[in-house]
Image: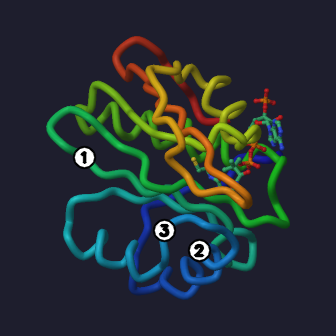
Amino acid sequence: MPQAAIRRCRLDQDFAGINVLSAEGDGPSASFLQQLYDSGACHSWVVCDDGDDLVAMIWVTLVLEEADVVDLRVAERLRGRGIGKQLLAASLQALRRLGMERCLLEVRESNRAARHLYAGLGFVETGRRRDYYPLAGGREDAILMAFTLEATDSSPG
Ligand SMILES: CC(C)(COP(=O)(O)OP(=O)(O)OC[C@H]1O[C@@H](n2cnc3c(N)ncnc32)[C@H](O)[C@@H]1OP(=O)(O)O)[C@@H](O)C(=O)NCCC(=O)NCCS
């Protein structure tokens, strides 16, 4: 896909889009993300389409030199076109510039798309939380993954 237009989230103008995107899946709610934004303890970057509709977002909290991905989400209608990869790669570059040394996240074991994306960019599995997520008819593990920001040069695209 062409280079995605990635910019910092501005909650005042992006909240409606965040609301729509959050409602598509089982990630954090828009109101939770709003609280995170207002706390000043997070960074968020978004992708907008030609009509300036928000089509992807990433939310990251920072503690000392570690970044933690709270949510990464691409609009359902635009998945599989390289937007998630571009957004995450650009965010990793930005996190490195902010002085972060590691980026951490957790992902459902069954989330093939996300795990493929993370592994492709250089995240490695560091552990697992057994039965962490509820699942229809049971539970599933969370896979813990980490990316060393110092060691890899990840460019958007
Ligand atoms: C996970 C998610 C962000 C990926 O974004 P995306 O824009 O669809 O992903 P991309 O098109 O950039 O694809 C990235 C890689 O994953 C692969 N991929 C995409 N969808 C896939 C799928 N369903 N199964 C396997 N691999 C898949 C692509 O082929 C690509 O691999 P490559 O780099 O080797 O070519 C998106 O599917 C999403 O928003 N899912 C719902 C929210 C979610 O689960 N977020 C992650 C929470 S941990």
From the viewer's perspective, tell me whether residue 11 is left or right of residue 27: left
Q: Quadrant of ligand 1?
A: top right
Mark 1–mark 3 CB contact (< 8 Å): no
Mark 3 residue crowding within 10 angstroms, few (<14) / some (14–19) / many (20+) = some
Secondary element at tag 2: helix
Viewer-closest of 109 and 8:
109
x and y percentages locating residue 155 in the rendered image: 57, 28
Amino acid marked by disc 2? Ser
Label 2 within 8 A of ligand 1 by Cβ: no
Viewer-closest of 106 and 133:
133
Mark 2–mark 3 CB contact (< 8 Å): yes
Amino acid marked by disc 3? Pro
Q: Is residue 144 above or below residue 73?
A: above
Mark 1 residue crowding within 10 angstroms, few (<14) / some (14–19) / many (20+) = some
Amino acid marked by disc 1? Leu
Q: Is residue 53 above or below residue 132?
A: below
Q: Residue at x 33, y 27 (%)?
A: 102
Give the foreground label among 1 and 3.
3
Q: What residue is pinned by disc 1?
A: 62
Q: Residue at x 49, y 18 (%)?
A: 153
Q: What residue is pinned by disc 2?
A: 22
Secondary element at tag 1: strand
x and y percentages locating residue 121 in the rendered image: 61, 25
Q: Earlier in the sequence, mark 1 or mark 3?
A: 3
Q: What residue is pinned by disc 3?
A: 28
Secondary element at tag 3: loop
Q: Earlier in the sequence, mark 2 or mark 1?
A: 2
From the viewer's perspective, tell me whether residue 43 is left or right of residue 47: left
Work out how far the residue at label 2 is from the one at label 1, CA to CA, in angstroms: 21 Å
Label 1 within 8 A of ligand 1 by Cβ: no
From the viewer's perspective, tell me whether residue 86 is left or right of residue 1: left
